[in-house]
Image: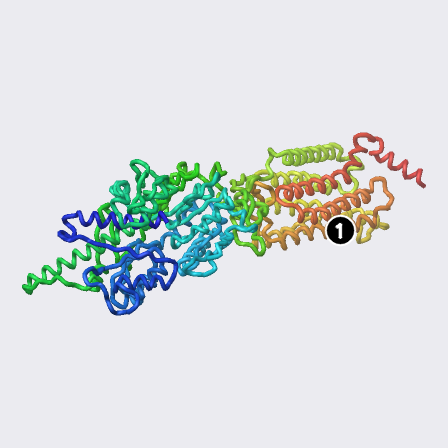
Amino acid sequence: MPNSYQNVLAFLFAIEKINKNPHLLPNISLGYEFHNFPYSHWKMLESSLILLTGQSDIPNYSCRKKNKSVAVLTGTSWAASAQVGTLLELYKFPQVTFGSFDPVLGDNGQFPSIYQAAPKDTSLVLAMVSLLLHFRWTWVGLVIMEGHKGLQFLSDVTGEMDRNKICVAFVKMVSTHLVSYMAAAKEYIILTKETSQVNVVIIYYDTDFLNDVNYYIEQNLLTGKVWVTNSQWHADMTGKSFILNSFHGTLIFSNHHEEISDFKMFVQEVNPSKYPDDFYLTRFWFNNFHCSFSDADCSLKDCSPNASLVQLPASHFDTTMTDWSHNVHNAVYAVAHALHEMLLQQAQMSLVENKKVTVFSPWQLNPILKNIQFKNPAGDQVNLNDKSKVDGQYDILNFWNFPEGLRLKVKFGTFTPHVPQGQRLSLSDDMIEWATGITEMPHSVCSESCQHGFRKTSQEGKPACCFDCTPCPENEITNDTADMEHCVKCPDDKYATIQQDHCLQKSVTFLAHEDLIGKMLAGTALSLTVLTAAVLGLFVKHQDTPIVKANNRALSYTLLISLTFCFLCSLLFIGRPNSATCILQQITFAVVFTVVVSTVLAKTITVVLAFKITAPGKRMRQLLISGAPNYIIPICTLVQLTLCGVWMGTNPPYIDTDAHSEHGHIIILCNKGSLTAFYCVLGYLGSLALLSFTVAFLVRNLPDTFNEAKFLTFSTLVFCSMWLTFLPIYHSSKGKVMVAMEVFSILVSGAGFLGCIFAPKCYIILLRPERNSLHHFRDKTHSSK
């Protein structure tokens, strides 16, 4: 294969450069020999025996008399290196591998005489996952070659992908000739129906034996896929031309190497006449330069003029050095430096012992090879000690193969594992040529990202990357982080936007005078206050008339004054609350309404006493004349003040906030403090009102022109009905509505007293003054008799 032959040319190039170097192995020329390893374990052992002894029939007997190798370079397969290494280890024969780094070969207990020229690739997984994260590819397939390295890569890459929330769509393990006999069938089903929707596939190659896999992909025209692979990948499709190329746009991770500038010039000068013993080169020349064979000596003739490997398209021969060719180059230099060091040690020893030492055994190179470190001609640091090696830097290449045969690898990025995490990956996205049929950066996800205001919910039986998007509950958001699994609840002082993508600061509000409902309630309270004051003035003006003097004139004045304060106290509930208003609201409401209800009770008892007097000197007459009903007001008020005192002393009202009732607003309101005390105050008021209603109801039919028992009955009925309705509505409402409901109840119940008790009297005073006289009263009495 042309890619493998490039390793041979790199080997020859390094040896020739060393032989021309006056400072490295001066006066010594390196020789070499090649052994081709077919895909057979026995053939590998046979070639190894020939390398050691010159024959393969009798072990431990060498037919070599003059030329003996001091080291062997093996690659690219781990199986080949391990197979050969097991035999060579019996003789402590130095072996330098130029395949990809393998931790198993670094086991000094099993293979102490094997050295690896390749840099460590333990950061390859991290580099690939970093690339996936950069392009936000979370749904990725894996095609991995069988073997211990493939299994280790599978374990590492799935672990790293899982840590970064990238899901494995499928895993396809591919057999090779050196691992499974099944590979001979050449049937590689890479993408099946259930995995064909995956747009990004990682292919991990370990050796150069996967052309059958490449060929299957090409035959099935699996275009539109992004292939991400390591440097062992190559598209050796010699003689196979496809209109559409499946590998165009492949992303390749290759070990970083400084360019060896003289190599292309060396390749340009390579030809069969320079290396006549190289049968493969002769055959390659014959196939690519239209040559013919001479009948006399089988030499080539009639070839294309100025034929050179550099003139061939990349599909036939790529002059850019691969990672393996760089490793071959470094391996040759490592053996040369080790040999140079050993010869220096022998020269120093001969000077000390005054004895010339010219013979050495290959095993003597092992201590030197184990610790050797040097820089190759390109400036790269070479180190064969596996323990002191560091992870190498990666070049990220983009494979351009459109039109077919271009075979150009363009560097568009790097990955450096030894820098801070955010600086490791460096890419030039605009340089990337994507796969055939893709005009923009491809998308590879199992489920599209959830929009703001939605959270991920996993799909049963599917990987974490496959999910549904569920709307967030009210006042919860998903912020700029995509695909959140949990919605974030906004703080109490903030609220979610309509898109539910961030929280906004809530504005502070309260039942203000500027609000429509505040204006209406305040206007109603002031109107009722003025009306009550007008009624009081009217009664004062007509204080000597029978209708005013009836049913205790002083109680009527007290009731009107207390109703005035009742309407005014509702204004305490409107406006921005503070600690003082919160306390005054409840105390004023409780005390004023207690005065109102107790006054109504006193008026009711006055009516009862008036109609119970049948003879002079009776005890009830004394009670009525002494004004005993008037004492009901201070006694009832004192009880209510006691309840309010206990309330204020234990758990008084205070300023509170309601951040949930009204969207986007924080409502400032007064908290009742002790609900028990609040309900005791209301219960006491209710009991007084119920008592007044009961007494008034019993005497509603007593005959008298100015009997107001019926009016008292209706007023207490309105009051009780209003507050019985208020309690459930108050509990079900929140925020400003709750405050407005409380104000409304105060105004309606006060207006009920004002209208039911005083409206009929005002009607008589203003519109029927003739009825407001003793003469009319006597006439009506005589007519009734």
Q: Residue 200 at what x, y percent from top left?
A: 48, 46
**Crowd tier of the residue under label 1, counting other residues whose Cα lies within 10 Å: few below 14, some 14–19, many 20 or above:** some
Residue 430 or 508: which is nearer the viewer?
Answer: 430
Residue 532 shown left or right of residue 108 in the figure:
right
Which of the 4 image quarters holds residue 564?
top right
Residue 386 or 239: which is nearer the viewer?
Answer: 239
Q: Residue at x 34, y 41 (%)?
A: 291
Residue 4 or 252: which is nearer the viewer?
Answer: 4
Q: Residue 643 at what x, y percent from top left?
A: 63, 53
Asked whether residue 39 is in view, the answer is yes
Q: How many marks?
A: 1
Asked whether residue 655 is in view, the answer is no
Residue 518 shown left or right of residue 429 in the figure:
right
Q: What kind of colouring is applied to the model shown?
A: rainbow
Look at the image and tell me in which quarter the C terminus lies: top right
Q: Residue furthest left?
A: 354
Residue topped by disc 1:
690
Q: Amino acid at mark 1?
A: Leu
Helix, strand or loop under label 1: helix
Q: Residue furthest front?
A: 296
Residue 584 or 758: which is nearer the viewer?
Answer: 584
Residue 337 shown left or right of residue 465 in the figure:
left
Q: Residue 649 at what x, y percent from top left?
A: 56, 54
Is the residue 342 above or below the residue 238 in the image? Answer: below
Q: Residue 519 at what x, y percent from top left?
A: 64, 33
Q: Residue at x 15, y 53 (%)?
A: 28
Residue 227 shown left or right of residue 447 in the figure:
left
